[in-house]
Image (tube, rainbow, N blue to C red):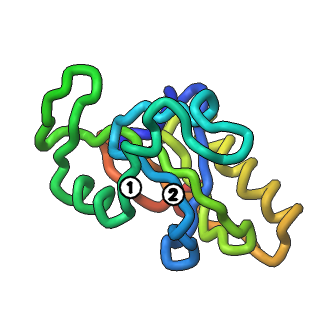
């Protein structure tokens, strides 16, 4: 799956176990849908400009990701067997349930950003300990960034 934004603008991120997240009040849209909630959510939390009608469930997101099938919202065509675009999911998370940090590529600056995020989290949330770092690269897959490599 591709992640939102270019890696140079968003080079690291946080990982939660979905079993520790309550999705009952989450807002989720299909892969590649431009929800743009920063512009389409009202102050009271309601969605504007048709965003509520486009919501999907976690099961629908997983099924689409498993099938590698999604609608290209710019062309209206269904795409098969391609790298999935991002999913926009807004959900409340508990920071104490973090399970890892990811880097967007093997570029040194991305790895250092992930290591810095992990170390900062260890300072502000010491109960987490030293979280693992995972490399997320659409071309090479997902794999651990080992302590030896660090």
Of residues 15 and 64, which is closer to you in this image?
64
Q: Which residue is mark 1?
A: 142
Counting other residues with Cα less than 10 Å from the Cα at mark 2, is it few (<14), some (14-19), or many (20 or more)? many
- Dot 1, crowdedness within 10 Å: few (<14), some or many (≥20)? some
Farthest residue, direction right: 124
| Mark toward the start of the polypeptide (2 vs 1) | 2
Vertical placement of residue 81 versus 66, above or below: above
Location of residue 74 (image quadrant): top left
Which percent across, then down, holds residue 62? 30, 61
For the point 46% across and 45% down, which residue is it? 52
Q: CA distance from mark 2 to mark 1?
A: 7 Å
| Residue behind mark 2 | 134
Left or right: 124 in relation to 107: right
Find out whether the residues at labels 2 and 1 contact each other: C-beta distance under 8 Å: yes
Residue 59: give x, y in percent of width and height: 31, 66
Residue 96, above or below 116? below
Query: Which residue is at 72% across, 46% downward?
Result: 44
Q: Is residue 27 visible?
A: yes
The x, y position of residue 53, in whole percent, is 39, 44
- Give above or below for 32 relative to 58: above
Instruction: State the quadrant of the N terminus.
Output: top left
Coordinates of residue 33 in the picture (x, y in percent): 37, 35
Residue plotted at (43% across, 35% down): 50
Q: Which of the image's four quarters has the C terminus?
A: bottom right
- Secondary element at image label 2: strand
- The residue furthest top is 75
Q: Residue at x 41, y 58 (%)?
A: 143
């Amino acid at each position: 799956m591709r992640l939102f934004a270019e890696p140079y603008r968003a080079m690291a991120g946080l990982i939660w176990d979905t079993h520790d997240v309550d999705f009952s009040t989450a807002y989720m849209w299909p892969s590649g849908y431009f929800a743009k909630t920063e512009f389409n959510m009202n102050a009271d939390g309601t969605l504007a400009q048709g965003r509520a009608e486009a919501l999907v469930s976690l099961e629908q997101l997983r099924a689409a990701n498993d099938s590698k099938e999604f609608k290209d919202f710019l062309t209206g065509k269904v795409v098969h067997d391609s790298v999935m675009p991002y999913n926009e999911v807004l959900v409340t998370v508990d920071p104490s349930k973090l399970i890892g940090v990811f880097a967007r590529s093997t570029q040194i600056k991305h790895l250092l950003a992930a290591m810095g995020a992990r170390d900062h989290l260890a300072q502000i949330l010491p109960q987490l300990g030293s979280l693992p770092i995972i490399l997320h690269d659409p071309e090479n897959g997902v794999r651990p960034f080992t302590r030896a490599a660090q």
